């Protein structure tokens, strides 16, 4: 599924959902990327504190893939899109 994220709050929600989808607790996710459980909690409520390194690590831990594309270019293949 493709998610269009335009705000930090949306990213926080996506991270929390991705963790749950991966079947991980906050503590398990934290251990996988080398941060505290409280840091995961903060990132799931306030993604403005998220670093790029943490975002990429969390995507990897949750089985997610981060893509950046030119919004003015059409997508080659239609994909399910979830807008917030």
Image (tube, helix red, strand yellow):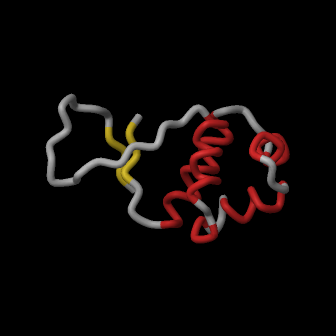
Determine whether 9 is above or below 80 in the image: below
Residue 17 on image: x %, y %: 60, 45
- Quarter-of-image position of residue 77: top left
Quarter of the picture holding the C terminus: bottom left
Counting the numbered discs, the total is 0
- Picture quadrant of residue 79: top left
Name the residue: 51% across, 66% down: 8
Asked whether, in this view, residue 69 is left or right of residue 42, the answer is left
Left or right placement of residue 76 versus residue 79 in this view = left
Which residue occupies 60% across, 62% down? 51
Please identify the residue farthest to the front as the structure is shown.
53
Is residue 70 depicted above or below 46 in this figure?
above
Q: Residue 69 at what x, y percent from top left?
A: 29, 48
Residue 63 shown left or right of residue 35 in the figure:
left
Q: Position of residue 41 (x, y in %)?
A: 75, 60
Q: Is residue 25 above or below residue 23?
A: below
Left-right relation of 39 to 19: right
Q: Who's the residue at 35% across and 48% down the image?
A: 68
Residue extending farthest to the top is 77
Name the quarter where the N terminus is drawn.
Answer: top left
Q: Residue at x 78, y 40 (%)?
A: 32
- Name the foreground residue: 54 vs 38: 54
Q: Position of residue 52 (x, y in %)?
A: 56, 57
- Image quadrant where residue 61 sits: top right
């Amino acid at each position: 599924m493709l998610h269009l994220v335009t705000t930090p709050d949306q990213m926080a929600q996506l991270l929390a959902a991705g963790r749950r989808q991966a079947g991980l607790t906050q503590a398990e996710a934290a251990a996988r990327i080398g941060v505290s459980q409280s840091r995961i909690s903060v990132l799931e409520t306030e993604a403005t504190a998220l670093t790029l390194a943490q975002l990429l690590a969390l995507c990897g831990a949750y089985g997610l893939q981060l893509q950046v594309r030119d919004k003015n270019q059409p997508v080659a293949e239609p994909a399910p899109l979830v807008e917030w």
